[in-house]
Amino acid sequence: MGGAFEFTRIAAANLREKDDSWNPAIGGFFGGAVAGMKRRTFPAVLGLGAGLAVAIAVFDYTGGSLLGWKRVANLERDEYEHKEMLRTTRRRPLQETLDELGEGRGVYGPGYEARRAQRIKENYGIDVPRSDS
């Protein structure tokens, strides 16, 4: 059932060259029809196909939420401004990140090169050339 839905939804989107709520509706009809084949009656195939098509189309049309239509809010939002707002309001100070994660994995605090050179010198006796920029 799920395979029939997904294949038909993607095939409909590719053939129609559109990404709208009709694609899940078409996929939902075929998925419901597969579920209706278990009863081996034509009315069950059509009924379950139509029922699932309507349910999935409404779910997709409302923005993938059972709580209401949210597409207008998403369409009116400028994506660049939204990401900049998230960067400024959700950014953590570097010291807080270093305290929680420690240095490494691409996150290095000020003076890391000097501490690294000192640590290598102490442990292995190797002078590490470094550029203090």
Image (cartoon, grey):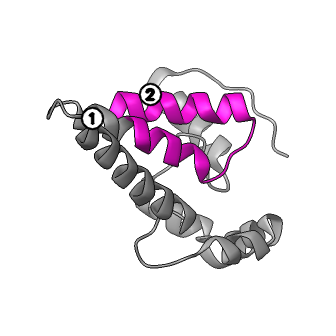
Residue 123: assigned label: 2
- Which residue, given by chain and number where applicable, does mark 1 sit on? 42
Residue at 51% x, 69% y is 96
State the predominant SS element of the stretch in magenta: helix
Amino acid tagged 2: Asn
* 49 sits to left or right of 68: left
Which element type, helix, strand or loop, lies under badge 2? helix
Judge by depth and name the residue closer to the eye, 97 or 91. 91
Judge by depth and name the residue closer to the eye, 118 or 86. 86
Can you see residue 32? yes
Measure the C-alpha gap from mark 2 to mark 1. Answer: 78 Å
Which numbered mark, 2 or 1, is in the foreground of this view?
Answer: 1
Which element type, helix, strand or loop, lies under badge 1? helix
Residue at 49% x, 78% y is 68
Q: Quadrant of the N terminus?
A: top left
Judge by depth and name the residue closer to the eye, 79 or 69. 69
* 103 sits to left or right of 35: right
The answer to whether residue 59 is above or below residue 122 is: below
Is-magenta flag for residue 6? yes
Measured from the top left, where is residue 118 in percent x and y? 57, 38
Residue at 47% x, 39% y is 27
